[in-house]
Image (cartoon, coloured by chain):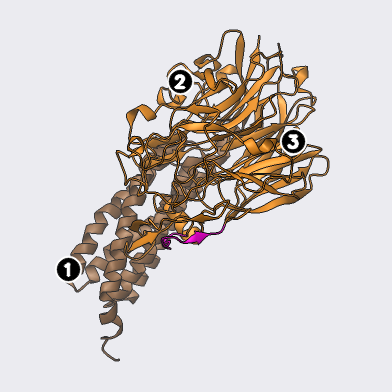
Chain colours: A orange, B brown
Amino acid sequence: MTLPTVSASAQTLRHLPTPARPRLDPADVEVPDGYDVEVVLAGLSMPTGMAFADDGTLFLIEGGSTWPPRPYLPARILRYAPRGGDPRGGDPAGDLAVFGEEPPERPRGATVHGGYLYVADKGDYHSSIVRYGLSTGERTVVVDGLPDSGWHEPGGPVFGPDGLMYFAQGSVSRNGVVLPQDYGADLARHPAAHDAPGQDVVLTGDNVDTYDVTAQYPYPVETGAFKPFGVPANRTERVAGARKCSTGVWRAQPDGTGMELLAWGVRNPYGMAFGEDGELYVSDNGFAEAGERAVANDPDRIWRIRNARTEPGSVRTPDWYGFPDICADGRPVWEQRHLPQRGRPARRLIAEPPAWAGPPAYVELPHSGMANMDVCRSDLFGHRGRLFACEWGSLAPLTSPRSQDVDHGFRVIGVDVAKGTAGDFLRNRHPGPASAHGTGGIERPVDCAFSPDGRSLYVLDFGVSHVDGGRHVSYGHTGVLWRITRR
Amino acid sequence: MASPMRPLVVEVDGRTWRGYVDRSAEWLETATLLQATYRKLLEDTVEEVADPRLRDRIGDLIESARRHEALINELYVAFSEDELPPSEVRASMLARTREVVARVEGLAAGARGGDWRNVRELTLTNLDSTNGFAVIEQLALAMGLPAVVDLVQPVIAEKTRHQLALREYLLEAAPKAVLYRPDG
């Protein structure tokens, strides 16, 4: 199905009918000298991920229910090809069509491999990986049953140098215990949702007291780690590890068989990429400083998943990366530096924790909202070997009361994973989203991908997602695809 | 370097957008009817209520209900940047509002002496009209219209509080209305 599109002039882009994002102007976007910025597509609704096929066709995901869960717009997979089918030909405009729809599965990330388009679906109670035959359009579920229905996202899928599929799933709870600071309707829609550990754990029984906002009166309730809302844990209670856990990172054959858990304790593993060094890198977001289990100053980070280097089938015990008790600096959530200004301090949930698999390969400012990533494998673009990481941007003051956290993110950085350092690659002239300053620049970068010819970096911009006070609203038809090309 | 690209705009061209605005205007008409129904039922009920305490409480809701109903004209402007809804929409809306209000008058008359039954009707009509505004919010979010969202969110919040209050009035009066009702 084709979509209503028109070829737009620069003038058109400065007078869009969406007051939330009325203008787009590449001149308002800063990139290093020697690079040009262009708008490729405008008017996308809640885009969450994208993937190139080898022939230059670009598949774009519109996520349906995203952040916040409403408005719930069509969860579509779009296929974009410049007119004539060859993006390297430089045709002035392209063809955009609906390749598939994923309602109510909430699609997120995508990749193309071996004649298939693979898509990670956030799902309802369970997330999954589906694949579409590129020539047939036939849809098949290859992985299902990963615990979800909660706060955080599926990651990947990506394919490694070994030809295996790597994917992830974030936490069900926001900060380790299912609590009503999540969107209220979530508790009503998913009363049985809870986290699951990746290996056997013994609990402290330090439950969290709160109120049941779904009850006729706000009755007091007690909730434990790895339990549904309102279900307490007991001291010394043992919870069995599950291969299909939350906060997990896995690999499997492309058809989903031979699934192997590599790691767990990764809170929100939205971005995944293999470096030129053969290592698997996974982005992750720090705890929120809000609610009845609040944690301050937990950095965003990129993990190096050590077990991705092992022989397939050889991982007996997955590595643990800290959720729900350890921050990215390796310190417990109950230590002084992580005590919240707002909300109730967190207590220990796991009595005898596994060894921590950190430190991260890269540590970022808290609440930067690290999202999808890609690695530059071309000398034509420059920065070869750098990991380009999208930073969706802060949700403060919703997730942090600290004024310095408000502008974190809203950019694309280039990470030197060997040194653990990074520099800005794409950002607005002023920190924060364009809508905060009334400019035509970027809002919230959610994914980036290099074109198969290695000449251009495409950056997918989610669009306007605005937080003020206790309110968080996102606007449809404000998503943009940008292209950055070396001159 | 790669050749420059001519950007595409998706679903925000003039024709598609006009279609979105027109379909939203149809929903605004529906929301007007739902709110007018609720407002009219409040006005009729307050005259019927014998309990002075309940009469005061319901009377307090009428001013808000009128204000919310009047706000819908502002929403038309915020959606389409037109001064007023198109004349054919206004005519249709007026005719249907009269029809609904007439039906509500009949409903209230049929329930004469039944405070409790009227309050029950109020809980249903307020819920329905709250959803009418909540749908407007979803349309505005989908179309990137912060001005509409800013107008409608306080209405939804206030009507949600009113819903809790109306349900309490209903439940407070329930045992007397059901168990202590005089036979015959």
Label 2 element class: loop
Looking at the figure, which quarter contains the C terminus of chain B? bottom left
Q: Are marks 2 and 1 in contact (CB under 8 Å)?
A: no
Hey, what amino acid is under mark 3?
Answer: Val
Tell me which chain the residue with mark 1 is part of: B
Q: On the rendered structure, is A68 left or right of B46?
A: right
Give the Cα separation between the discs numbered 2 and 1.
54 Å
Q: Which residue is mark 3?
A: A112
Main SS, magenta region, reads loop
Residue situated in front as seen by the camera: A327 or A82: A327
Q: Position of residue A135 (x, y in %)?
A: 83, 40
Residue A11 is a magenta residue: no
Residue A236 is a magenta residue: yes
> Is the same chain shared between marks 1 and 3?
no
Q: On the rendered structure, is A40 left or right of B127?
A: right
Give the Cα separation between the discs numbered 1 and 3.
67 Å
Q: Are marks 1 and 3 in contact (CB under 8 Å)?
A: no
Circle 2: is it few (<14), some (14-19), or many (20+) Cα within 10 Å?
many
Hey, what amino acid is under mark 2?
Answer: Thr
> Is the same chain shared between marks 2 and 1?
no
Q: Position of residue A440 (x, y in %)?
A: 49, 21
Farthest residue in the bottom direction? B184
Hey, what amino acid is under mark 1?
Answer: Arg
Mark seen at residue B53: 1
Q: Which residue is mark 2?
A: A439
